[in-house]
Image: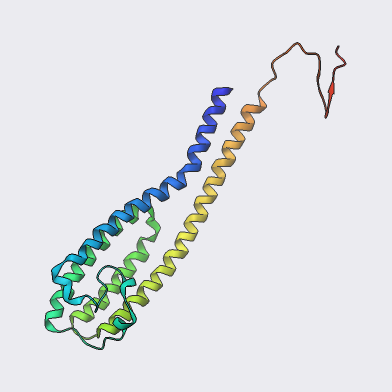
Amino acid sequence: MGSRLLFLAAVAFSLGGCSYVRTYVADRDMGDVVKYCEKKRTNVAVRPLVGKLPIVNVDEITPDMLAIDDVPTAEDVEAIRALSRDQRDCRDRIESVAKDHWPTQSATRKGLAMKLDLVTAQLLKRNLSYGNANRLYQEAALDAEGKLTDDRKEQLAQAREQETEAWRTIGDGIRAVAGTQKPEPTGDPCTWSGNSVDCSAR
């Protein structure tokens, strides 16, 4: 009995730690991708765009960047091409990590990538001001963030439900093991009778 109970307790402990470990691994893997993408800031080819367009993340967009009425120059177009290559490389890295941890979010991420590429295409054609491009980038990112948040909430609810079911199964197993346990004879004539001790066998 002791070894079975110990085994069930070990299983319970490992299940309780599963969601924590999954979150830790996902955060660590994504942290590595963020570090990789941050290195793209040092690309000399994109330096002319600093302060005009976000280099790594749309969170870099400031009110001043939304107010830029200038359309890219011919020289800027080459920098935008280099920035687009860097951003695609980052997105590919993010996708390779995210598909392992959040596979159901793939369609939302791909939809965002397509929208960002469409805006970049208009910049390359010099049909769009920097300010308008930044606004469109932000709107696309906000829309995707809302969808990802909803999806994440659903995933968390499913994970909680699975863990609850696992704990219920473990509890049933512990009760089954404990229920088959018979008290060892002690030679003591007293025993429980309802909620009181009965020593009438003496």
Q: Is residue 166 above or below residue 115?
A: above
Which of the 4 quarters of the picture holds residue 200?
top right
**Residue furthest to the bottom:** 69
Q: Position of residue 140 (x, y in %)?
A: 35, 74
**Residue furthest to the right:** 200
On-image quarter of the N terminus: top right
- Using residue 152 as the reference point, say whether residue 122 is left or right of it: left
Measuring 64% from the left and 32% from the top, which residue is drawn there? Answer: 175
Measuring 72% from the left and 13% from the top, which residue is drawn there? Answer: 185
Measuring 66% from the left and 23% from the top, which residue is drawn there? Answer: 181
- Using residue 150 as the reference point, say whether residue 177 is left or right of it: right
Q: Position of residue 33 (x, y in %)?
A: 28, 57
Which of the 4 quarters of the picture holds residue 118?
bottom left
- Using residue 13 as the reference point, say whether residue 51 is left or right of it: left
Q: Position of residue 121 (x, y in %)?
A: 22, 77
On-image quarter of the C terminus: top right
Q: Is residue 100 above or below residue 60?
A: above
Q: Position of residue 179 (x, y in %)?
A: 67, 27
Question: How many marks are shown on the rendered structure?
Answer: 0
Measuring 59% from the left and 41% from the top, which residue is drawn there? Answer: 168
Color scheme of the displayed model: rainbow
